[in-house]
Image: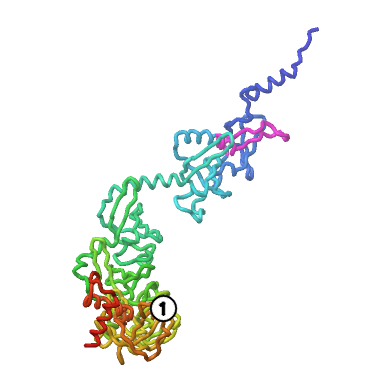
Amino acid sequence: MASTAFPSRDDFAAMLDESLGGADGGFEGRVVKGTVTAIENDLAVIDIGLKSEGRVPLREFAMPGQKADLKVGDEVEVYVDRVENANGETMLSRDRARREAAWDRLEEEFNKEARVEGVIFGRVKGGFTVDLGGAVAFLPGSQVDIRPVRDVGPLMDLPQPFQILKMDRRRGNIVVSRRAILEETRAEQRSGLIQNLEEGQIIEGAVKNITDYGAFVDLGGIDGLLHVTDMSYKRVNHPSEVINIGDTVRVQIIRINRDTQRISLGMKQLESDPWEGVAAKYPVGAKLSGTVTNITDYGAFVELEPGIEGLVHVSEMSWVKKNVHPGKIVSTSQEVDVIVLEVDSDKRRISLGLKQAQSNPWGAFAEAHPVGSVVEGEVKNATEFGLFVGLPGDVDGMVHMSDIAWGISGEEALHLHRKGETVQVVVLDVDVEKERISLGIKQLEKGAPAVGGGVAASGSLKKNDVVTVSVLEVRDNGLEVQAGEDGATGFIKRADLGRDRDEQRPERYQVGQKFDAMVTGFDRSKKPSFSVKAMQIAEEKEAVAQYGSSDSGASLGDILGEALKAGKKD
């Protein structure tokens, strides 16, 4: 009896592989073609030539935002996940098939740096999701448009080009950019437009955006910058004072940089330049009226006419207000009178003076109060060298400490008066150019020398004169004396009361006592200084000259004796 051969397990596996396409060419994990045999509800029944058919949701055959265009008999590509599941059905996927095909196509496009078409269909953290014909890519928010986009709604579900920036098939990552496409397109348009533009050309454009430093004007596909300084010849604090977004403006092309594709525009260049002939229109010394337009720490700008402004420096704002902020002297929009001090047409600068348009209070004071006049004022301040006194005309004068009182030191004299006290002073000197007024208090005392004279009291005293003086006051450091009955008063220091130490004692004298003394000089207020010692030395020299010499053999006593005898005979 012949034996019957039964197939083994290995034979059965080989026959199964053969029926499914062979061990190396199996269906699972591959993209195969199939035929739509039926459409049931939301599922498409697809036959790929196996024992059972597979079902695929219709949504996998539709593009984002669209309906599936599918009918019985259509041939489609699907991905085989499994040949047979627990229910005996074939597991198919249209999305996987499209994804695999898309990755192959996208890798080719990426290597060629070509554009790809996709649809934005979802929003994720930091950006959006894009369907690139089956493969899902990430679109960062910064790569959506050239400028920030607040609402991406109008861009979604619309086929549009993208540029692949990065892709990693192993990790399934794709990063795309819409901005790169827009920038490339804009660059092409700008290059074409900029070739048709020339410097000096006058063109119209629409204001697209306004910043603090100017405005961007659309010239028909390319933007130009209209700087705030080129909007008008007059001062413009902010571009919104001149133009608004959406306005159509007529501008002139000032500069074109074809390398950077930047265009500078100007509006004021279309107007006549007000600075032409400005030197003849505003000569130095002319008095004009203007409006304060701007105030800074260093001065104020005054508009003389639209487009012409001059600067009043802080030093030229007031005769009497020094180190004061210009805002405390003038205010914006105030009408003021000014004097033209300097004109520089090349630098477009005009220097103006505000105080020069007003009377000089120092000159007015000098006319109203000549040297020697007595005025009354309030002590404004006391310094280490004198007193400042407020005078009529809102000016100040200074009493030097040596001109406060007779016979005492300047430091002691400063303590005789306090701030806020009203005092009478005499005008000693007025320097209008240097804005200085010198005053004196002690010159008002009885017997004080006349102010402004060339000599001392009543014009009779001269240096080296010997006069009779009377004691007015005895002090520890000397005597206060007066020449004649009503002459100038002066002071004799203790050391000048005599040659000998015994004679240099002030207590030897009494008030009202008279004696002779020599005028040795005058101080800055023309008050005389007297000296008994100087008179004695002068008399001795005269006696020696008349009655003997150093080689005559006569003694000093003999000589003085002869001089005294001669004096008695006379």
Label 1: which residue? Answer: 409
Give the vertical position of 273 relative to 13 (above or below): below
Q: In this view, does 337 lie to the left or right of 66?
A: left
* Whole-percent x, y for residue 480 in the image: 37, 85
* Whole-percent x, y for residue 421 in the image: 43, 85
- Region in magenta: 72-100
Residue plotted at (26% across, 77% down) = 559
* Whole-percent x, y for residue 105 in the image: 50, 34
Tell me the quadrant of the picture where the N terminus can be found. top right
Q: Is residue 281 left or right of residue 532?
A: left
- In front here: 83 or 323? 323
Q: Residue furthest top?
A: 1
Q: Is residue 188 left or right of residue 289?
A: right
- In magenta segment, residue 77: yes
The kind of residue tagged 1 is: Ser
Tell me the quadrant of the picture where the C terminus can be found. bottom left
Q: Quadrant of residue 273?
A: bottom left
Kind of element beneath mark 1 = loop
